[in-house]
Image (cartoon, rainbow, N blue to C red):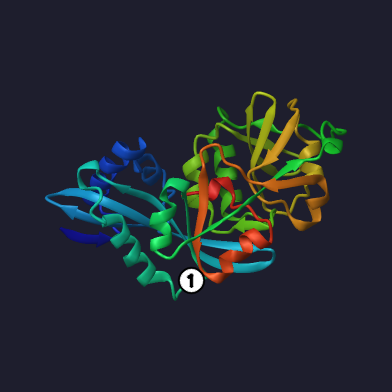
Amino acid sequence: MEFIFDYMENDILRHKLNTLTRKIYGFDFENWMAGGYFEGDYIPFSFIQDGKILANVSANRMHFIQNGVPKYYIQLGTVMTDEAYRRQGLAGKLMGHIIKNYENKCDGIYLFSNRSALGFYRKTGFKESEQYLYSLKKAWRGGMQRGAAFRKTCGQDEQIKRKYMDAVRNCAVNSALEHVNKFGLQMFYTSDLQNVYYADDMDCFAIMEQTKDTLILKSIISKQHISMKDIVSHIGVTYNSLILGFTPASSDLDMFEVSVFDDKNDDRLFYRGEDLERIEKEKLFFPQLSHA
């Protein structure tokens, strides 16, 4: 069994990783790589044997502005082991490699998993943390619309996609926990522009998804800071509730109710490092589109 890491640009090894990723999670990285969205921040750590990836844990380099303070975290993702090789401690050993490599070079290490893995992560030095969800107060729903409503970008020409990609690369801080090097992950989720909307008069993109009468505002992408008052006033769809997939900026907090995040999928935040304790203390929420 051989330990390998940081090989995403090696076509042969990446295809072997894709085989396991498709088997465990049902996706692969090929379209993401072919689209030019990989910029080196996703680093797989794997065990390989007889030409087959047996287990993987990936380190994602994550730069944030956290309430005005730059933070450099490592997010663990794509944690997986082939079914035939489980209960051998392979994932734990890979986490050990990542922790040894990064713990003294970053402000903390975190990941998302369900409560069933709590014992495993505690053994590897992780603590469990709450996150907080923000929903628009009733008084702000359906307010007076100013300017043209956000319009769909999917199906338009390539110019709007290039404009969107440029805005993602050069995005202003629009939240209390702003993912700075967001290009790779943002494009992983939104490269098809399916849920990407644009408001011409604000030169602003919004990633929105509606489920029944609930609107989820997942991300705001603009080169200049845009207030949530302006964002809400440009939403043209009807909704009974609006929740954010990120933490609003401090200047917008009065518009939102806050509650402990209760994920139906039971995904929990696990972390190592004192800086990450402030996620719960400051009632923050890691952006949905920053999950690896």
Which residue is depicted at the point 15% across and 53% down?
49
Q: Does 256 sit left or right of 39 as displayed?
A: right
When the figure is inspected, residue 171 is found, relative to residue 160, above or below; the finding is below
Which residue is depicted at the point 88% across and 33% down?
144
- Image coords of residue 73 (percent x, y): 51, 64
Which residue is depicted at the point 37% across and 46% down?
33
Image quarter of the N terminus: bottom left
- Image coords of residue 154 (percent x, y): 57, 30
When the figure is inspected, residue 129 is found, relative to residue 197, above or below; the finding is below
Q: Report the residue marked by disc 1.
A: 106
Which residue is depicted at the point 52% across and 39% down?
190
- Image coords of residue 54 (percent x, y): 22, 49
Given residues 281 and 36, the one toward you in this image is 281
Q: Does 190 sit left or right of 281 as displayed?
A: left
When the figure is inspected, residue 109 is found, relative to residue 267, above or below; the finding is below
Q: Does 270 sit left or right of 208 as displayed?
A: left
